[in-house]
Image (cartoon, grey):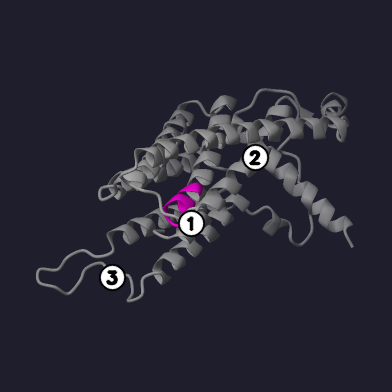
C-alpha cells in the first residue's frame, strides 16, 4: 500500500462503496414509510435466483480484500517474510504486514456479510455490526502505529485519515445501540466517501503530485494546504451526497410516482410501519436486485 496504486485502488473501492450506500440510503429515506413486505417471495425465480440473492457487498469486500492482499505480497520482491536471518533476528516489512492485516480484515468482513445474509436461517445484524466495529478498531490501532516514522506532509495526510477512521468508529459504535437512526446512516455514508476520496488524494500528494514536484516537508504552506484540500473534500462529498439524494428524489417522483401510492392501494403487499433501518436498507437492496433482474430479462 506504500505506493500510488496502493492508495488509489482502496480509495476508489471505498469511494464507490460510499456512493452506492448514498443511493441506497436516499431510497430508504424517500420510501421510509412504504416498503415491500420482506415476507413476500422475490420476483426473480429463475435458475440464477439463488446466486442473484448473494450479498453483493460482502462479495465485493472479499474480492477487493483478496486482490489487495495479492498485490501487497507481489510488491515485495524477495517474498514477504516475518523475520530476517540475522542474529538476533529482526522483524521485517513492518508496514507491509500492517497493510496485509487490514486487507485480511476486509476479506473477513465480506465473509461474515455473506454468512449472515445468505447462509444463516435469519440475518444476524448484530454479528455484521460487531465484526465491522472490530475491523475499524483494529484499523485505527494499525494506522496510529503506521505514522510512527512519518513527518511533515505524510504525517498530516495520515493524521487526517485517522480522524475520518475515528469518526467512522464512533458512528459504528453508536449504531450498536441505536441501529434505527437515519442520521447515523447518512453520516456513515458521508464518512465512507470521505475516506475513499482522501485516500485517492493521498496517493497523488505523496507519490504523484499534479505539479510534478514533490511536496516539501519543511514548507509550512504545503502542510497547511493539505488541511485545506481535506476541507474541500468535506464540502465536495457533502454536496455529492445532497446531489444524489436530490436526483433520487426527483427520479422517483417523476418516473415512478405510483410507487408510493401502491402502499395504500395494495394493503396485502405493502406495510406501513416504522422498522429498523437495517431492514429498510435490506429491502431497498432487494428491490434494486429485482429491478436489475427484470431489466436483464427484458434486454435481448
Magenta segment main secondary structure: helix
* Label 3 Cα crowd, 10 Å radius (few <14 / some 14-19 / many 20+): some
Q: Residue 195: x percent and y percent?
A: 49, 42
Q: CA distance from mark 1 to mark 2?
A: 46 Å
Q: Residue drawn 41% across and 65% down?
A: 72
Residue 187, image quadrant = top right
Q: Is 27 on the left-hand or right-hand side of 221?
A: right
* Label 2 Cα crowd, 10 Å radius (few <14 / some 14-19 / many 20+): some
Q: Mark number for residue 212? A: 1
Q: Is 34 on the left-hand or right-hand side of 64?
A: right
Towards the viewer: 204 or 130: 204
Q: Residue 163: x percent and y percent?
A: 40, 36
Q: CA distance from mark 2 to mark 3?
A: 42 Å
- Circles 3 and 1, Cβ within 8 Å, touching? The answer is no
Segment colored magenta: 201-207
Q: Which residue position holds label 2?
A: 282
Q: Residue drawn 36% across and 45% down?
A: 153
Is any part of residue 138 visible from this angle?
Answer: no
| Image quadrant containing the N terminus | bottom left
Sequence-wise, which precedes: disc 1 or disc 2? 1
Sequence-wise, which precedes: disc 2 or disc 3? 3
Q: Residue drawn 25% across and 48% down?
A: 148
Towards the viewer: 173 or 199: 199
Q: Mark number for residue 81? A: 3
Sequence-wise, which precedes: disc 3 or disc 1? 3
Q: Mark number for residue 168? A: none
Q: Is 127 on the left-hand or right-hand side of 264?
A: left
Q: Residue 63: x percent and y percent?
A: 54, 61
Look at discs 3 and 1 and give the one toward the viewer: 1
* Label 1 Cα crowd, 10 Å radius (few <14 / some 14-19 / many 20+): few
Magenta run includes residue 272: no
Amino acid at each position: 500500500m506504500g505506493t500510488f496504486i496502493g492508495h488509489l485502488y482502496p480509495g476508489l473501492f471505498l469511494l464507490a462503496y460510499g456512493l452506492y450506500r448514498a443511493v441506497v440510503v436516499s431510497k430508504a429515506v424517500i420510501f421510509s414509510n412504504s416498503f415491500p413486505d420482506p415476507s413476500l417471495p422475490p420476483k426473480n425465480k429463475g435458475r440464477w435466483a439463488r446466486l442473484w440473492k448473494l450479498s453483493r457487498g460482502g462479495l465485493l469486500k472479499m474480492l477487493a480484500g483478496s486482490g489487495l492482499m495479492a498485490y501487497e505480497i507481489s510488491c515485495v520482491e524477495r517474498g514477504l517474510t516475518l523475520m530476517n536471518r540475522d542474529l538476533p533476528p529482526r522483524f521485517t516489512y513492518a508496514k507491509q504486514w500492517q497493510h496485509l492485516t487490514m486487507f485480511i480484515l476486509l476479506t473477513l468482513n465480506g465473509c461474515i456479510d455473506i454468512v449472515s445474509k445468505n447462509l444463516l436461517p435469519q440475518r444476524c445484524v448484530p454479528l455484521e455490526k460487531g465484526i465491522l466495529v472490530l475491523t475499524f478498531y483494529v484499523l485505527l490501532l494499525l494506522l496510529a502505529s503506521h505514522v510512527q516514522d512519518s513527518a511533515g506532509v505524510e504525517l498530516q495526510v495520515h493524521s487526517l485519515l485517522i480522524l475520518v477512521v475515528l469518526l467512522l468508529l464512533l458512528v459504528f459504535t453508536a449504531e450498536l445501540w441505536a441501529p434505527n437512526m437515519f442520521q447515523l446512516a447518512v453520516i456513515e455514508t458521508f464518512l465512507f466517501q470521505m475516506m475513499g476520496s482522501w485516500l485517492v488524494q493521498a496517493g497523488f500528494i505523496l507519490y504523484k503530485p499534479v505539479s510534478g514536484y514533490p511536496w516539501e516537508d519543511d514548507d509550512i504552506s504545503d502542510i497547511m494546504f493539505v488541511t485545506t484540500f481535506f476541507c474541500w473534500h468535506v464540502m465536495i462529498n457533502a454536496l455529492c451526497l445532497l446531489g444524489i439524494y436530490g436526483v433520487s428524489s426527483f427520479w422517483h417522483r417523476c418516473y415512478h410516482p405510483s410507487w408510493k401510492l401502491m402502499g395504500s392501494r395494495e394493503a396485502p403487499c405493502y406495510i406501513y410501519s416504522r422498522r429498523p433501518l437495517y431492514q429498510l436498507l435490506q429491502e431497498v437492496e432487494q428491490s434494486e436486485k429485482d429491478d436489475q433482474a427484470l431489466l436483464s430479462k427484458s434486454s435481448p
